Structure formats: C-alpha cells, structure tokens
Amino acid sequence: MLKKVNSVWSLAISVFAFQQLSAQAFLNGSFEINTAAACDYNMSNVSWNAKMSNSTAYGGGGELDIMQSACPYGPSQSGTWFAALAFPSTSDAFTMQLSAPLVSGTTYSMSFWDKGDLACCPPGMPVVIGISTVAGAGGTVVYTGPTPTGGVWNQRCFTFVAPNNGQHVSVTTAGPTRWSHVDNFVLNGSCTILPIELSCFTSECRNGTTALKWTTATERNNNFFTVQYSFDGINFSDIGTIKAAGNSNDSKYYEFIDTKPLSDYSYYRLKQTDFDKETTYTPVIGSERCKTIFDYYFEVFPNPAAESINIKTDVTGAELIILNSIGQLAYKTILSENETAIDISQLNTGLYFVQVIKEGKTQTKKVIKN
C-alpha cells in the first residue's frame, strides 16, 4: 500500500512538472502587443517600455525601433510588427517576459527570426540571447547567432540548458556594425530546417555582362541552383544552373555570369533544388542596366540624403529617372542643365537607383534616402 501511495505521489509530481514546463511561453514574443506609431524609430528605453508590452529596454544606444510591414524596412516575418536593434556607441537591448520561470538545469529549445537591414546599415549584427532573473538586465548568454542576411528573414533554432530560474529572455547584438531586425520568438516550438541559409545575393555590371554572386552559410541536401531572370520582377525564366555543395556547415561562394543581360533594369532570383527534387526560392534582387553604359561624367551628392540630391553631369537633354529598391519608378525628368537639384523629401527612406539615360545608354548610381 505504501508503494502504491508513493507511486501516485510520484506521478502527481511529474504531472505538475509537465504543466509547469508547458506553461512557459513568451508573453509578447511576436511584438504584436504594443501602442507604437506606424514606424517608431530611435526610441529611448523609457519610450520603448511605455509602448511595448511585457518587454523592458535596458540598452544605452537609444535607437530601439518598433516597426511594422508598412515601414520602409519591412515587412515583418509574421504578423504586423517587428523590432530592430542598432549598435551605435552602446548596443540596444531589451528583455521579454515568459509566462513562468525556467527550471534551472532543464533543457529547452528556442527559435526566432532575424534579418539584416538592407537599405540603411548592412550587414547587420549577430543576435545575442541570454536568460535573466530580472526584467531589464542582461542575462547569462545561451546563444550567439550568425550575421543576419541582408533583407532576408532566417529562422534561428537552438537548444540550451537553463543557467538559472530566469523568467526573462534578454536580446541584444554583438556589434560592431549596425541594425538587425528580430521577430517571432518561440519557446519549445518546432523549427523549420531550411535547405540553405543564404548569407548574401548580389549583382554587379562587368564589361557589359551581369555578374551574380551569392554565399551560403549552411546547406542541407542541396543539389543545384537554377538562376532565373525577369524584366518585371514577376515572370521569371531560367538562364543557367550551378551545382551546389550538397551538405555543408561552412561558407560556400557561387558566381554566375549573365552574358546577355536585358538592356533595361533586370531582376534575378535563385531556385534551389534538393536531391529529393523539392524546391525553394530566394528573394528577388534588382540589377543595374549592364548592357549599354555610357562613359559621360555623372555624380550624385550628397549620399545619403534627406531632402534633396544634386545631379552633376556633362550631358544635357538626358532623361533622369529614380527607381526604388525593387525597380519601381519614383521620379522622372529631363536634365536641362549640367547640375540639377532634385527634391526627394517625399520619398520613403531606403535604397534608390538614380539613372541618367542618353541615346539608349545608361549610367546608374545608388543613393540612400534617410
């Protein structure tokens, strides 16, 4: 009889422990509970604490941001909102509260998403996660991530042994570059293992051709890449394939030369194919007009700019256009003088391409609008 009672008592303890573990979750790991304006930039700790529920800022940077998909640096990974941390002289940082304390010595899993800013301050900074016993204080570090990919959300998954009975997860960055976006923190959830982790994907003009370069941080079951191009960013065609590494935990570098680029602005993406024939697609990137480039003098200043830019060139009667980062027309005019001031105060912040076109030939400059 005594053994039976002990058995029941032991079962009750196990059930209680399971309920305690299963109740632990982020109270606002998606950042959806807040009172922020559409795009709240450069917030002090006090401002962040007043607007973001179940979160306490403690960094000295004063540049914490609460953003939504409508902001120039969106979209969010899921839902509407996401957070961004900068690294000026002192790193930004905040803690997020869990619904129950962790049990010291117990193994947990955690996932979240990060993205490096593409327009303002690439390449972003590794995100550092800690476990803290108090709100608004750096915890014992349990994870330091890789450098986030510019403009691409990647899911980070890791396991850790709780170093204490903390109920707060601290989030900061490793520096010294700046601006990483984070979203959708989950405790003890499932992690999607992606076939590749893309570190960068870029294009450049090279003697009338377009050189596409990309780097993977990890690869799993990756058979080959198919390079695709488009004139409108919607309809894509295959232009070549590159054999992939298969499985790798080291950086791998790839290059493909488009020897017959479009004479207009072009778009490119990669289709990744597994050995089991499953496919995924990378984000779309834009390319300058590489086919015909004239050698006239062309300068844009200041850069970055906030209110206006000056166009200085030794040609007149040329067409000037400004495209946003995805190739949409933002401004168009005809240059009548060798130096022209262009008002850009109404444009959204972000990356733009300024192009001067004369007799079907083009020069392009990149400009950041602050």
Image (spheres, rainbow, N blue to C red):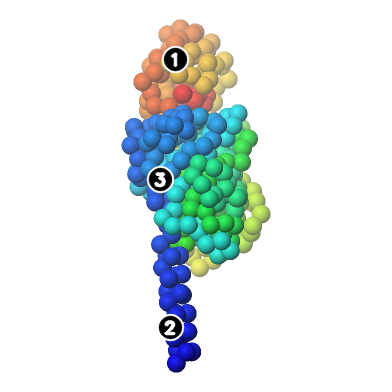
Q: Quadrant of residue 323?
A: top left
Compared with 119, 339 (above or below) is: above
Q: Residue at x 40, y 62 (%)?
A: 23
What whole-number distance in Å separates the C-alpha atoms at marks 1 and 3?
41 Å
Residue located beneath label 1 in the image: 308
Camera-nearest label, 2 or 1 = 2
Q: Residue at x 61, y 37 (%)?
A: 175
- Which element type, helix, strand or loop, lies under badge 2? helix
Q: Is residue 68 left or right of residue 224?
A: left
In the rendered image, residue 318, in percent from the top left (x then y), is placed at 44, 15
- Which element type, helix, strand or loop, lies under badge 3? loop
In the rendered image, residue 113, in percent from the top left (x then y), is placed at 48, 49
Q: Residue at x 46, y 24 (%)?
A: 369
In the rendered image, residue 115, in percent from the top left (x then y), is placed at 50, 43
Type of amino acid at the residue the image marks with label 3? Asn
Residue located beneath label 2 in the image: 8
Q: Earlier in the sequence, mark 2 or mark 1?
A: 2
In the rendered image, residue 273, in percent from the top left (x then y), is placed at 51, 60
Q: Residue 54: give its label.
A: 3
Camera-nearest label, 1 or 3 = 3
Q: Quarter of the image containing the N terminus?
A: bottom left
Q: Residue furthest front?
A: 2
Mark 3 residue crowding within 10 angstroms, few (<14) / some (14–19) / many (20+): many
Q: Is residue 119 left or right of residue 146?
A: left
Q: Is residue 191 left or right of residue 207?
A: left
